[in-house]
Amino acid sequence: MKPAPFKYYAPSTVDEALARLAEHGWDAKVLAGGQSLIPMMNFRLAQPAVMVDLNGVSELFYIRPGRNGGLSIGAMTRQRKVELAPMVAERAPILREALTKVAHPQIRSRGTLGGSIAHADPSAELVALSVALDARLRLRSKQRGERWVDARDFFLGLFTTVLEPDELLTEIVLPPMPSQSGWSFMEVARRHHDFALVGVAATVILEKSRDPAKAKCEQARLVYFSVSDGPVEAFEAAAVLRDQEPTAEAIREAAETAGNKDVEPNSDINASSEYRRHLVKVLGRRALTEAFERARASA
Amino acid sequence: MTELIKITVDVNGTQYERTVEPRLLLSDFLRHELGLTGTHVGCEHGVCGACTVLLDDEPVRSCLLFAVQASNHRVTTVEALGTPDNLHPIQEAFRERHGAQCGYCTPGILMSVVPFLQENPDPTEEEIREAISGNLCRCTGYQHIVDAIKLAAERMRA
């Protein structure tokens, strides 16, 4: 239960960190909040030869207003800071809601937004949420400079992303929430704040209508986590609702479709595939119902 | 032999200078290097909460932090709360309401409750349970702990 030895660097700028990563490549591991990495090191599931600690890189800690009501968040911004930021509550309330479900307050005071996304745990709330919100991710490397990747293209599989070994996730940009939109974020876990058995991020947009109660669905999105090797978007379920009035029956049909067509859940020690499929349907229905209620209320 | 790094950490108001391996966990630094054994170590992977301390006034798991990362930062451990003759109000409430039980999880719970009651001096029972949800008590006597926190909050408000 003690980490293996490693060489430790504590850069104070992004450029310095990138230089270290360029120098050490696959041998190096980036240390953000460390709330997933250090447990893995304590178990010796991870034994990086070199650690590049970003906790002293002050330029990566910020929450800024983005264009048209969006947000730009530095990759090292602590989860707890994001959770408590009034600007986040106002501009991306779903992010605040998701963060309250990430581990415990003591973990969130150290854990970072970028660290969770780059770690790409399939049960991570922030991974699914970044896809559901169409987050754009800024990646930097010493050799190739900067590139922007959409969250939906960022995750390749279990703990695997498009990040090259010399590359750093530096910023997360969230687009503004459209008008007449609603959201919901739900999960089922065996213990409060434990890893979710199944979770879902839902966002919906209603068409403009004189009577919001009768407005049709312009777009509905469900992104599930803890069901596969990465976040799973339920495209078939979304198609069921498009241009339809989101009645209780339509929502129920969409949620059934998510469980029957979009998601092929894993079985593991915590839950069987069948139970997860059941939760996919239940959470899909509840989350869509809540999201459409919020969208109507905002119309 | 791995390289050693010189660090300066403020623990409970005292500056400690030590030379340590980068892989040394903050929890082991506190216990083994400084002899501050009030901080307990349970699971060493961030689940049980027994090792919770304050880093710059925020509650963190000391088993999920390297000692080198605490250099030039302030750490507060349970030793800073009170003495046997002069208990902190939270400690006094734990004594009165039997919140300590076997005592293993207690330091971590106390160090989680200190910042919680500063932020939220008049919490509901639900908020209290949420605040200590990251601290496992294997005596499973959460009721006494919740009662103690309620009493502490009441007295600290007065």
Image: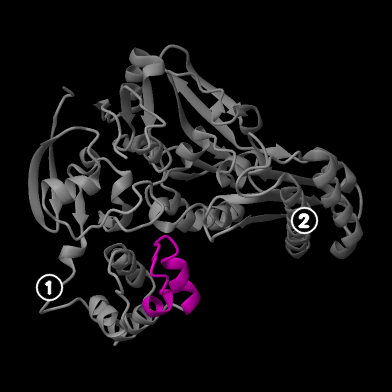
Percent coordinates x, y for residue A194 in the rendering: 52, 54
The crowding category of the residue bearing disc 2, from other C-alpha atoms within 10 Å (few below 14, some 14 to 19, many at least 20), is: many
Image x and y of residue A232, in percent: 70, 38
Which of discs 2 and 1 lies nearer the camera? The answer is: 1
Where is residue B3 shown, x and y percent of the image?
16, 24
In the picture of the structure, the residue carrying the numbered disc 2 is A288
Q: Residue at x 26, y 27 (%)?
A: A5
Type of amino acid under label 2: Leu
| Residues packed near mark 1 inside 10 Å, few (<14), some (14 to 19) or many (20 plus) | few
Residue drawn 17% across and 57% down?
B37
Residue stretch in magenta? B125-146
The chain to which mark 2 is attached is: A
Q: Which residue is depicted at the point 88% across and 45% down?
A: A242
Q: Visible in this render: residue A210?
A: no
Kindly identify the amino acid type of the residue bearing the numbered disc 1: Thr
* Colour theme: one colour
Disc 1, SS: loop
Mark 1, residue position: B83
Closer to us: A193 or A40: A40
